[in-house]
Image (cartoon, helix red, strand yellow):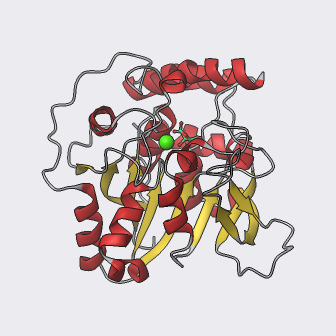
Amino acid sequence: MASARKIIIDTDPGQDDAVAILLALASPELEVLGITAVAGNVPLALTQKNARVVCELAGRTDIRVFAGCDRPLKRKLVTAEHVHGKTGLDGVALPDPTMPLEDAHAVDFLIETLRREPPGSVTLCPLGPLTNIATAFEKAPDIVGRVAEIVLMGGGYFEGGNITPAAEFNIYVDPDAADIVFRAGVPLVVMPLDVTHKALTSRDWVEGMRSLGTEVGRAVASWTDFFERFDTAKYGSQGAPLHDPCVIAYLIEPDLFTGRHVHVAIELEGTHTLGMTVADWWRVTKNAPNAMFMGSVDRDRFFALLTERIGRF
Ligand code: BDR
Ligand code: CA
């Protein structure tokens, strides 16, 4: 097998972030160089803790976890306890982590790692607001050209938004950071709500996780049960959208997803549209494409992959 792809997961766990982390840790195709936490679904003190809870659940206390930015670049932090619960990881009760948080700031870890590793060998996987990544790019512009690719969860076009009618949560929380990242010139793959709202859990799948009979299986089932309630109430859909695992699944099996290479701009001024990802899906401008904006997923294969990998714990 080719050598494992080196990734850094930048995250704000979040139950779906947690499943994404587990998927990455179960996958030999990927080498997780570190996990950087950012404020998003819940404040930083909880996201960095939850990241360690998930690593411990996976038996991976060797993974280095760093705390990053505790607020967006220019705006007040907006959180999503209404979706993820007070802890950000509501569901089955899990023990407080015993593995340490690294001393270094997540932004410095990003910079040092990208400077140390060969150019084009590290992929960034943002699963939350883009504050850490944008801050690293602003502080150390020399690292931008060294990033292999950014594969992120964020935005929505045909599907609209989930925190405002126009904006998806991760982009809305820090649109200024998203603007920096989308204009950076790094190859970008975007998993918007257009895709992730098709990656809905089924009752059978959740019960399948529970009947694995493992601690990890029980946790995954309880997490998805917890945040399914929110989406069912809001969209009338059955099942919980596994937003963030789409990013990791793409790294393992890219052909699960289809989309278009288009120009995507971040709305920074709109009275009603702040944080909207304005995707030129129909290519009506001459703006050069800056992102592979995904539109669909092979749902059955996606869940088969998750089942097989989560079953490895
Ligand atoms: C995104 O926002 C968070 O609530 C989820 O973890 C996901 O990253 C979906 O809009
Ligand atoms: Ca997230």
Image quadrant where residue 30 sits: bottom left
Spot occupied by residue 154 in the image (x, y as percentages of width and height): 59, 51
Spot occupied by residue 311 in the image (x, y as percentages of width and height): 48, 36
Say if 29 sits above or below 64 in the image: below
Q: In the rendered image, is residue 63 in sight? A: no
How many numbered badges does the structure rendering display?
0
Say if 51 sits above or below 214 in the image: below
Spot occupied by residue 145 in the image (x, y as percentages of width and height): 42, 83
Q: Residue at x 74, y 23 (%)?
A: 238
Asked if residue 289 lies left or right of residue 28, the reply is: right
Q: In the rendered image, is residue 118 in sight? A: yes
- For the N terminus, the image quarter is bottom left
Say if 45 sits above or below 133 in the image: above
Spot occupied by residue 3 in the image (x, y as percentages of width and height): 40, 72
Q: Residue at x 44, y 47 (%)?
A: 75
Say if 107 sits above or below 48 in the image: below
In this view, the residue in front, 304 or 223, is 223
In this view, the residue in front, 150 or 234, is 234
Asked if residue 170 lies left or right of residue 147, the reply is: right
Image quadrant where residue 306 sits: top right
Asked if residue 161 lies left or right of residue 39, the reply is: right
In this view, the residue in front, 153 or 130, is 130
Q: Residue at x 43, y 37 (%)?
A: 18
